[in-house]
């Protein structure tokens, strides 16, 4: 069985203490809690007449909005990267084709004299 180590730490959000437990480092969990606490504080300063429940819901909505926008940004970046990689792959394939064309073609020349043969690849003429 694959057991992962869980870290446990106490964080403070909106003046209350919470015990967090997870696979992330304690520093990471504290950073997340501090970020949320600051978002709540910002809303408390703007919405002085809202109760704490409403402020935490607004904070959750704002954070969800940030998350959705970042996901959209990541999707756009992934698409742009895929397009650039496809363009690069196409340019590499074209370069390989160009290198293959640079090699002399033997088809128009026959025999050891290497003289061009006229009419190669043309339909035979009708005799009248």
Image: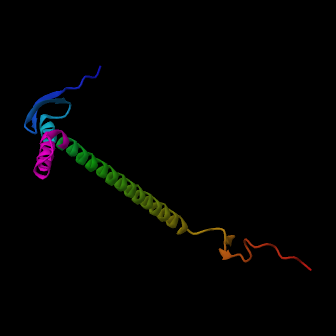
- Tell me where residue 56 sits by quadrant: top left
The boundaries of the magenta stretch are 33-54
- Quarter of the image with the C terminus is bottom right
Residue 103 lies in the magenta-colored region = no
In-front residue for pair 36/103:
36
What residue is rendered at 10% in x and 34% in y? Answer: 11
Above or below for 95 versus 63: below
Figure coloring = rainbow
- Tell me where residue 22 sits by quadrant: top left
Image position, residue 55 (x, y; %): 17, 44
Image position, residue 123 (x, y; %): 79, 72
Q: Does the magenta stretch mainly form a helix, a strand or a loop?
A: helix
In-front residue for pair 48/28:
48
Image position, residue 110 (x, y; %): 69, 70
What residue is rendered at 34% in x and 52% in y? Answer: 72
- Judged left or right of residue 125, residue 43 is left
Instruction: Count numbered badges in the picture.
Output: 0
In-front residue for pair 78/118:
78
Residue 45 lies in the magenta-colored region = yes
């Amino acid at each position: 069985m694959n057991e992962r180590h869980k870290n446990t730490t106490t964080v403070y959000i909106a003046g209350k203490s919470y015990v967090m437990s997870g696979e992330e480092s304690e520093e990471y969990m504290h950073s997340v809690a501090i970020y949320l606490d600051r978002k709540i504080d910002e809303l408390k300063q703007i919405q002085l007449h809202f109760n704490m429940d409403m402020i935490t819901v607004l904070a959750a909505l704002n954070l969800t909005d940030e998350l959705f926008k970042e996901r959209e940004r990541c999707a756009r970046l992934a698409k742009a990267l895929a397009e650039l990689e496809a363009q690069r792959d196409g340019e590499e394939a074209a370069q390989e084709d160009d290198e293959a064309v640079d090699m002399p073609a033997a088809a128009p020349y026959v025999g050891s004299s290497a003289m061009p043969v006229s009419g190669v690849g043309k339909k035979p003429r009708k005799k009248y």
